Image: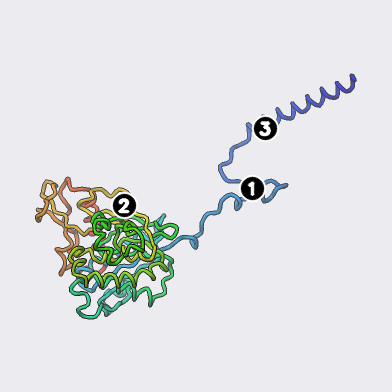
Amino acid sequence: MGCGKLFFIMVVTCSAALITYNIILSANAPLRKDFPGPSHQSSKFPSLFSADSIIKLPSRKSKRLFHTAVTASDSIYNTWQCRVMYYWFKKQKNKPNSDMGGFTRILHSGQPDRFMDEIPTFVAQPLPSGMDQGYVVLNRPWAFVQWLQQVNIEEDYVLMSEPDHILVKPIPNLSREGLGAAFPFFYIEPKKYETVLRKFFPEVRGPITNIDPIGNSPVIVGKDALKKIAPTWMNVSLAMKKDRETDKTFGWVLEMYAYAVASALHGVGNILHKEFMIQPPWDTTIGKAYIIHYTYGCDYDLQGKMAYGKIGEWRFDKRSYDNSWPPRNLSMPPLGVPESVVTLVKMVNEATANIPNWGY
């Protein structure tokens, strides 16, 4: 019994000493910031702590790239905007967090122009004479139909954009799980105009809330989904224009309602992103926005106060240049004018200063 007790005491003492030694050794070992990998993995369990079993960074091939498409006529008005837009597209495309792929200007004038070498361009045919009934925007869905049918688009997604969009930072693919990504417009109100919209979106297709408060731009949507939506968008646009009540109700936003209806008819919902773009002068800061949409005129007095409903002492309005090229080095706004307007003018000036043969 005495020998047994002595042996037991020796085992306990040795074990305690070994544990104490390991604790001291571990406490003084240098810390590693990297993941376990082949250079320091256990020789007994070579695959248990391999880098591949923990995390694998996505490769370029796994990115969900989208193709940016802009419809335009060959007017000076559309052309100068497209040149500015494409300048900023190229600057933002290859920056971090970008899922931006190729770019196409869909020119629906029916013939090439002199900017084909500057801007990647697909020439689409306009609607037959008289079919647009003076509403030139109806050429947009028809142009998209032609482009989608005739061109092999490498990317799996499409961003529908417009000439008067300036990209202030790289755009990631905001769409998810079969849903498009779109900007919500406050003036697209399906619920308010349910009676009119039921002519094109019958009750059997579901509640009117299935129609999102969007237009076709900016929208990021799957290419295959857009191939289905586009012909319906075109047909609904034409049908709405022919219907006197609908035409009177929707006016210049008719084609936007038509896209929202077509998307809903094909069961393609949209994630609404308020930060997708800003619209000066009503939006005063850039915030998290990706796009500046300069559809509204910006008018201010020389003290930097907005001039509501009248031409300001200082102004920037794209419609001032419907038949002429904006000059290089536009005058900057007075002190006190919001960040969004200042940034817009700076970005237009940078583009025009660097685009060769500006004004020709």
Q: CA distance from mark 1 to mark 3?
A: 22 Å
Q: Type of residue at label 2?
A: Lys
Q: Type of residue at label 3?
A: Leu
Report the quarter where the N terminus lies.
Answer: top right
**Sequence-first tag of 2 and 1:** 1
Q: Type of residue at label 1?
A: Phe
Q: Which residue shows up at 30% across the image and 55% down it?
A: 184
Q: CA distance from mark 2 to mark 3?
A: 56 Å
Confirm whether residue 360 shows in the render: no
Query: Whole-percent x and y of residue 115?
Result: 27, 74
Which of 14/187 is in front? Answer: 187
Residues marked 2 and 3 touching at CB (< 8 Å): no
Q: Which secondary structure, mark 1?
A: loop
Residues marked 2 and 1 touching at CB (< 8 Å): no
* Occupied quadrant, residue 357: bottom left
Q: Which secondary structure, mark 3?
A: helix
The residue that disc 1 covers is 49
* Occupied quadrant, residue 77: bottom left
Query: Whole-percent x and y of residue 338?
Result: 20, 48
**Sequence-first tag of 1 and 3:** 3
User: Are there few (<14), some (14-19), or many (20+) residues within 10 Å of tag 2?
Assistant: few
The residue that disc 2 covers is 274
Q: CA distance from mark 2 to mark 1?
A: 43 Å
Residues marked 1 and 3 touching at CB (< 8 Å): no
Query: Whole-percent x and y of residue 140?
Result: 28, 71
The residue that disc 3 covers is 25
Q: Is residue 222 left or right of residue 82?
A: right
| In this view, 123 is above or below 83 | below
Q: Is residue 301 left or right of residue 163?
A: left
